[in-house]
Amino acid sequence: MRLSRGDNRLNERKKLILKAIVDAHIANGEPVGSKYLTLNKQIACSSATIRNEMAELEEMGYLEQPHTSAGRIPSEAGYRFYVDQLIDRYNLTQNEISELKAVLRQRQNELDAIMQTAVTLAARLTNYTALSVKPRQTRISVSRFEIMRLDSTTAVLIMLIGGIVKTKYIRSDRPIPQDAAMLLAGALNARLTGLTADEITMPILMEMERMLGEYDFLVSPVVKAVCETISVFDGGELRFEGINRLLAYPDYYDMDRLREMLALFEKKETLLEVLSEEAKGDDRVQVFIGRENVVKVMDNSTLIFKTVTQNGKPVGAIGVIGPTRMDYRRVIATIEGLTKSVTDALGGPKDEGTGRLPDHKD
């Protein structure tokens, strides 16, 4: 989450009123007036005092008045201050926690399946559009090679990449003896392990050809297969669930804006670029409100996501996209609970999370 933006102009009464307005607007979707706060939020002030405080909060940029009525709604700055300074802890119910653990436990060893299950749960539990990200990786290499000979002219190249096994068939017009397969595996492990596709140079290929002697004809097709596999492997992936849920919110009734959002989801490239970069850094919940989003079309939306780790390394992220008038407490707690459950299912480091909203840190 972004660093808190403290403002010493906000006394405790202003904070109480701002929090009450954000909570009420999230719940009802309507501008909030002083009468509502007096009757429903147990604020020990007169209506006149509350109106004055609301006017000052508007001047300070934390509230907006969409119509000529007395009601106000939070601005982006108001939502940001709420998320950073005022938000209450939200406890996931025991049923919600049990559902997360039970469903994810069934898919212990499949990262893709676990992430898909998690993003489906995120959409259902929050009623917003959910997403899962497998970020682009800047350095992909093979840690181990094996060659399995199938017949006289066909072999299988087996590569271990980041704990995942990838295979490629190698077919040759010339015979591939068993000793050639052994020599090739030895050359690959000696010269290509730990190298990215960009680091595999012509001198390395020539050295491998010298190592294979009369079987040097195998080097070129095998190295080509290695480079193709690495290039596909580091492309990243972005999945969405519940895109139609946007239609439930008035914020997306404008058809031109909705079309732009749907185009963003369909092309994926821009969001994948942003999320891949963000998912490599902070392991806390990330909250981007309105114009804080890099993507312009999301200037009336909030993006909330958190990285998923395996063995202490980020392997993806789970998040939610919805209107700025979002139930932040519930969404943040759900994302926290999901990412913890996914990390546990992947055998990552355990913590003592309880499904509560994390403490904010300056």
Image (cartoon, rainbow, N blue to C red):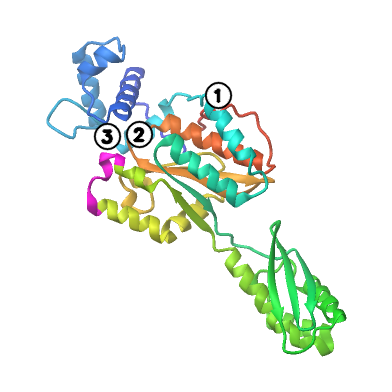
- Where 129 sits versus 87, above or below? below
Q: Is residue 50 left or right of residue 269?
A: left
Q: Could you tell me how many numbered marks the image carries?
A: 3
Q: Which mark is residue 79?
A: 2
Residue named by callout 3: 61
Residue named by callout 1: 94
**What is the crowding at mark 2: few (fewer than 14 residues within 10 Å), some, or many (at least 20)?**
many
Q: Earlier in the sequence, mark 1 or mark 2?
A: 2
Residue with the most extreme right position: 179
Q: Nearer the viewer, residue 59 or 162?
A: 162
Where residue 174 appears, as percent x and y from the top left, is 76, 89
Look at discs 1 and 2 and give the one toward the viewer: 1
Q: Nearer the viewer, residue 320 or 151?
A: 151
- Residue at image position (69%, 58%) is 162
- Residue 245's image quarter? top left
Q: What's the distance in space between the residues labelled 2 and 3, CA to CA? A: 11 Å
- Residue 212's image quarter? bottom right
Q: Where does the magenta region start and end? A: 248-256
Asked if labels 2 and 1 touch by Cβ distance under 8 angstroms, the answer is no
Task: Name the chief secondary structure element in magenta.
Answer: helix
**What is the crowding at mark 1: few (fewer than 14 residues within 10 Å), some, or many (at least 20)?**
few
